[in-house]
Amino acid sequence: MGKRSSLFGLGVTRTVGRLRTGESRRLLLSVCGVALAVALMISVTGVAVNLAGGSTIQGDDVDYWIVPDGGSVSSVAVSVEGPQLGAVHETTARLQADERVTFATPVELQILQIDTGSTREYVLAAGVIPPESGERLLGLPTDQLTPGDPHYADGEYTGPWTGEAIVSSAAAEIVGVEQGDTIRPARAEPNQTFTTTAIADGDLSGGVGPVPLIVVHTSELQSLTNTASQDSADQILVSTNDPSVESTLEAAYPETQVLTRAGLGGEDLSTSSLPVAVAVAALIATVAIGTLFVATLVGLETIAVREMIAVQGALGLSTSSQMIIVFAQTLTIAGLGGVVGTLGGVAGLKALNVGATVFGSVSQIAAFHPGLLAYGPGVALVIGVLATPYPAWIAARTDHLEVLS
């Protein structure tokens, strides 16, 4: 064991010495090649860490959805008839008062049976509180709905019934209405009808085609579906460009989850397999490129020093001992590249975030984790181990007599 340690130390000392003197360009290129691969891997893995940690890429159009545990906003079918939130008007008003919030609205989703006169058809009704800015909600514009929720009347549900409804093209076709026509929900009171304020193309899809959707005021849909007494809704949508508001949203209700959404049909990045896929792809690419690069250049370096290998053999150094020296040289080169690459990758994380803030109005796209400081050199050592067989084979195949003659 002592002999092997001495041989390994000899290989490390020789490699470091050659790097210091600049005697071998190939060794320096090997170090730089590993460093570049590891730096890119650290930067990409930092993006994956950011995604996995829930700090998904957040820009000016970031939306948050507060949903009950067990609920979801990734599927309309799951959201309907699922767990609900209570006292949504009061909570929404409190969130709306936060200066970081652009607007907030409860979203009540119900399947409504519509009486068309000859038949009864089913559509998805979404109850919202239209903002003053007339934002698009659930893929439909709300600028032709009265802002606020007049019928709520401070919890008494005695305010004026607006009867306004924005109807998607799919719903208008099924129900057979045009702009200005009356929509009569089945089993509704005579004064609980809706008027088609506008027909619009929406981008909400159920996976098999456009969803037949009508958007109305939350309190009016609650009155129709007997959920007014609990003031309940399926979700609360909060629009903001300030990620710091997330902690406030998490404290709004117990046993809820806060999801970052880019649309009702999207996929939540923080709970999907995307972060793992990104990290694994970066790891595989780094190991493959680094191994080929180091094996090739160290192999060429081994060929260049065949005379030294022959002399060592003539002095009685066995083939296995020479292979230990080559292993130490390869591992040293890879380790140095790993350390340099890790430091470069950490600097790259900061550069990515600065660039995203300056050019993309994004707060953060990559996150640093202390484990990355060990991850980079660790992967580099794996590269060194995998790259060793080729130069070791060259050293073992060297014909001492032929080289010395």
Image (spheres, helix red, strand yellow):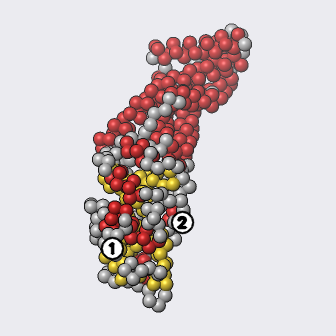
**Above/below status of 21 relative to 177:** above
Q: Is residue 400 left or right of residue 86?
A: right
Looking at this view, is 119 or 3 the one in front?
A: 119
The residue to which callout 1 is attached is 161
Q: Position of residue 347 (x, y in %)?
A: 40, 30
The residue that appears at 39% across and 78% down in the rendered structure is 192
- Confirm whether residue 210 shows in the render: no
Please give left or right for residue 403 compared with residue 219 in the image: right
Looking at the rendering, in which quadrant would you find the N terminus? top right
Circle 2 Cα neighbour tier, 10 Å, few/some/many (<14 / 14–19 / ≥20): few
Q: Residue furthest left?
A: 132
Residue at 60% over, 15% down: 11
Quarter assignment of residue 149: bottom left
Left/right placement of residue 100 relative to residue 112 reads: left
Q: Which mark is in front, 1 or 2?
A: 1
Q: Residue furthest bottom?
A: 118
Task: Pinpoint residue 340: horizontal percent, then vertical percent.
Answer: 46, 25
317, above or below 205, in the image? above
Image location (x, y in percent) of residue 99:
29, 47
User: Amino acid under label 1?
Assistant: Trp
Residue 287 higher or lower than 313, as above or below: below
Q: Earlier in the sequence, mark 1 or mark 2?
A: 2
Amino acid under disc 2? Glu
Above or below, comparing residue 246 to residue 84 in the picture: above
Mark seen at residue 81:
2
Of 323 and 190, the residue lying toward us: 190
Residue 104: assigned label:
none
Q: Tell me the distance, in whole angstroms, between the alpha carbons under discs 1 and 2.
A: 25 Å
Residue 135 locus on image (x, y percent) = 31, 62
Residue placed most toward the observer, 354 or 94: 94
